[in-house]
Image (cartoon, rainbow, N blue to C red):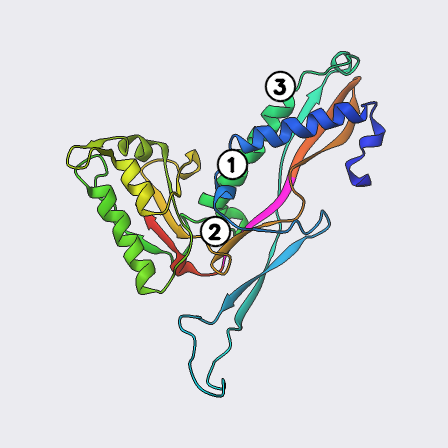
Amino acid sequence: MEFLMRDDVNLSAEQWQSIDSAVIQAARNVLVGRKFLQIYGPLGAGAQSVNVDVLTPAEKGSVDFFGEEEEAVKVTGRSFKELPMIYRDFVLSWRDMEQARIDLGAVSAAANACAQKEDLMIFAGNPKAGYEGLATAEGAFKVKKSDWSKDENAFSDVVKGLQHFADKNLRGRYALAVSPDLYAQLQRLQVSTGLLESERIKTLVGGGLYMTPALGLNKAVLVCAEPQNMDLVIGQDLITGYMGSAKLNHEFRVFETALLRIKCKDAVVVFG
């Protein structure tokens, strides 16, 4: 990986290992989308685009003696999307670099920023760049959200979303991502059941309940997160490269290339 230019700076293998570990740990503390999305890749740092396919529905199989009645699942539409780069730079002073053990605070902060940006791309997209997010995808199923701070409204709304999946024959792993304010509203004890509303909903969706600031306020997204419906394409996974020195100090970049692919808009339910 010569493009990282790691040999151009006087860091030992152990120091680079500590930087890589700090990046991974900081990202894991933040990332939400990767907890339920299937990863496609890594395709490599040189990958610049990826195809986004539309498949024929595969709602039912066929039953016959000779096996000649089946209509094959096939691609009915294909577009190509560029893999954007998500990045954040940080600087280490020459004096810090001269220490046997460098302070990794700046490294973790840069990785944290990249992870937040990845989730923002997954959930909110980037309209300026032409990327849709789960909460902004045109054609996703919309449910007018009730007041989740009262009664069993949240539970009932999620049931509506699951009923939509049943109507479309979408089965598999479900995940519900909610904004922080809605997550707080779900921490209510339902007297009739003795359970928190969040616990009931978590059981309803098979354990996949997540909170993410990337959704902003008063918004939630329910997905059927099977790979035929959506995935997260990774070109180059999060890594750190050296960019050069200026005024004796050293500049680095934490970066990745990634893109959300939504292959089936029916597999996305937006509450708002």
Q: Is residue 153 left or right of residue 82?
A: left
Label 1: few (<14), some (14–19) or many (≥20) C-alpha neighbours in 10 Å: some
Residue pictured at 44% horizontal, 37% vertical: 214
Sequence-first tag of 2 and 1: 1
Q: Is residue 180 magenta?
A: no
Residue pictured at 49% horizontal, 68% vertical: 55
Q: CA distance from mark 2 to mark 1?
A: 18 Å
Q: Majority secondary structure of the magenta segment?
A: strand
Position of residue 211 measured from the top left corner of the image (x, y, whole percent)? 40, 35
Residue that protrudes farthest toward the front in the picture: 65
- Report the magenta residues as a range: 256-262
Which kind of residue does numbered mark 3 sit on? Answer: Gly
Which kind of residue does numbered mark 1 sit on? Answer: Leu
Q: Is residue 207 left or right of residue 104?
A: left
Residue pictured at 53% horizontal, 50% vertical: 38
**Residue tagged by mark 2?**
132
Q: CA distance from mark 3 to mark 2?
A: 32 Å
What SS does tag 3 mark?
A: helix
Position of residue 193 measured from the top left corner of the image (x, y, whole percent)? 19, 37
Q: Is residue 249 left or right of residue 78?
A: right
**Residue tagged by mark 1?**
31
Residue pictured at 69% horizontal, 22% vertical: 91
Figure disc tally: 3
Q: Is residue 258 magenta?
A: yes
Q: Mark 1 and mark 2 in contact (Cβ < 8 Å)?
A: no
Task: Give the quadrant of residue 110.
Answer: top right
Sequence-first tag of 3 and 2: 3
Residue closest to the eye, 47 or 166: 166
Using the image, tell me which numbered label, if any, was put on residue 105.
3
Q: Mark 1 and mark 3 in contact (Cβ < 8 Å)?
A: no
Label 2: few (<14), some (14–19) or many (≥20) C-alpha neighbours in 10 Å: many
Q: Is residue 122 above or below residue 182?
A: below
